[in-house]
Image (cartoon, rainbow, N blue to C red):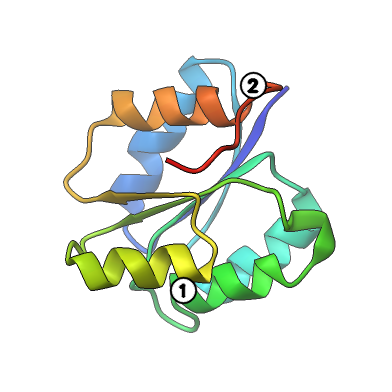
Amino acid sequence: MTKVLIVDDEPFVIRMLRDKLRNAGISVVSAVNGKEAVGLAMSERPDLIIMDWMMPEMNGIDACKAIRTNPEHAGTPIIMLTAKGQELDEKKGRDAGATYYITKPFSPRRILRLVEECTQPSGGGRA
């Protein structure tokens, strides 16, 4: 079963994505900050990570970089899901290791399609 780590400090976003993914038969774990996300990425070994940028304790950019330093997670797709929509922000997100960069507000259906695409045997490519 596919496992996704959702990282966001907004409970509504976690609930919405968790429900959508679970309805599609995907296992979900969640974190409310980047520091917690790094620990869960190491212990839970998700197939994909959905990461917010602006969070307490450790932001999504720093968490993304920390996760990418572990060779086991070098190829794990990361969807950066954030309100930061400037072109320079997207570059920073991709430079930190985000596979995809999606701005809020977002379509839950689009996220589900990306999760399915990234977790297929031939998925995980950069968009």
Q: Nearer the viewer, residue 125 or 78?
A: 125
Q: Name the spot of residue 43 as percent of width and height, x first.
A: 80, 57
* Residue 7 higher or lower than 16, as above or below: below
Q: Name the spot of residue 17 as percent of width and height, x first.
A: 39, 36
Amino acid type, mark 1: Ile
Which residue lies at the image location 17% right of the left edge and 67% below the top edge? Answer: 86
Q: Name the spot of residue 31 as percent of width and height, x first.
A: 54, 59
Disc number at residue 61? Answer: 1
Q: Secondary structure at mark 1?
A: helix
Which residue lies at the image location 74% right of the left edge and 56% below the top edge? Answer: 73
Kindly tell me whether residue 20 is visible in this rendering: no
Does residue 120 appear to the left or right of 70 in the view shown?
left
Q: Quadrant of residue 27?
A: top right
Amino acid type, mark 2: Gln
Does residue 102 appear to the left or right of 29 in the view shown?
left
Residue under numbered circle 2: 120
Question: Which residue is most to the top?
Answer: 24
Please identify the quadrant where the N terminus is shown: top right
Which residue lies at the image location 38% right of the left edge and 40% below the top edge? Answer: 15
Q: Residues within 10 Å of mark 1 (few under 14, many from 20)?
A: many
Please identify the quadrant where the C terminus is shown: top left
